[in-house]
């Protein structure tokens, strides 16, 4: 580990934020960002438990990544669909509002 790593990370982050325009259309990145948590939670089950032989049967790392990414994204879309149908976000808002009232 290099002692300058934290400084490089901070400098790089500030440079990217300051050099990129704020009104940029990032709909693909926003879409992936919306599903990133579900994908993170699901990919281990897909990769290690359920479809291990299928995923690693592609032999090439980029193909393995692409297939795992696509399956995880598809499962995340399905999960988000069920979350909206069940009313998960309404319940989440009620719990958060209740907690804010408790700890004010």
Image (tube, rainbow, N blue to C red):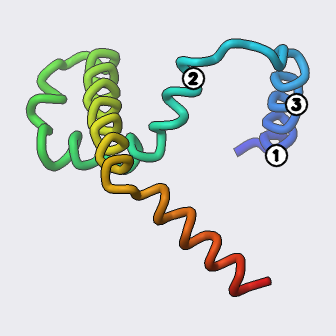
* Marks 2, 1: nearer the viewer: 2
Q: Nearer the viewer, residue 94 or 59?
A: 94
Residue 32 point in image, percent of width and height: 49, 29
Q: Is residue 5 above or below residue 98?
A: above
Q: Nearer the viewer, residue 81 or 51?
A: 81
According to the picture, the residue beneath numbered tag 1 turns out to be 3
Badge 3 crowding class, 10 Å Cα cut-off, few under 14, some 14 to 19, many 20 or more, is few
Q: Is residue 67 above or below residue 99?
A: above
Q: Earlier in the sequence, mark 1 or mark 3?
A: 1
Specify whether 20 is left or right of 32: right
Q: Earlier in the sequence, mark 3 or mark 2?
A: 3
What is the C-alpha distance between the residues marked 2 and 1?
A: 32 Å
Badge 1 crowding class, 10 Å Cα cut-off, few under 14, some 14 to 19, many 20 or more, is few
Give the residue displayed 45% in from the left and 37% down from the top: 35
Residue 44 point in image, percent of width and height: 29, 47
Give the residue displayed 29% in from the left and 30% down from the top: 74
* Marks 3, 2: nearer the viewer: 2
Quadrant where the N terminus is found in the figure = top right
Residue 2 point in image, percent of width and height: 76, 42
Q: Nearer the viewer, residue 20 or 64?
A: 20
Q: Is residue 9 above or below residue 57?
A: below
Q: Is residue 76 above or below residue 84?
A: above
Give the residue displayed 54% in from the left and 34% down from the top: 33
According to the picture, the residue beneath numbered tag 3 turns out to be 14
According to the picture, the residue beneath numbered tag 2 turns out to be 29
Badge 2 crowding class, 10 Å Cα cut-off, few under 14, some 14 to 19, many 20 or more, is few
What is the C-alpha distance between the residues marked 1 and 3?
A: 19 Å
SS assignment at label 1: loop
* Marks 1, 3: nearer the viewer: 3
SS assignment at label 3: helix
Residue 15 point in image, percent of width and height: 87, 23
């Amino acid at each position: 580990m290099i002692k300058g790593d934290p400084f490089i990370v901070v400098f790089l982050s500030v440079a990217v934020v300051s050099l990129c325009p704020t009104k940029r259309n990032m709909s693909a990145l926003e879409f992936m960002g919306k599903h990133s948590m579900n994908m993170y939670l699901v990919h281990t089950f897909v990769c290690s438990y359920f479809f291990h032989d299928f995923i690693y049967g592609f032999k090439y790392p980029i193909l393995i990544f692409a297939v795992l990414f696509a399956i995880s994204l598809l499962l995340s879309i399905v999960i988000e669909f069920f979350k909206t149908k069940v009313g998960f976000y309404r319940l989440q808002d009620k719990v958060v509002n209740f907690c804010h009232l408790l700890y004010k």
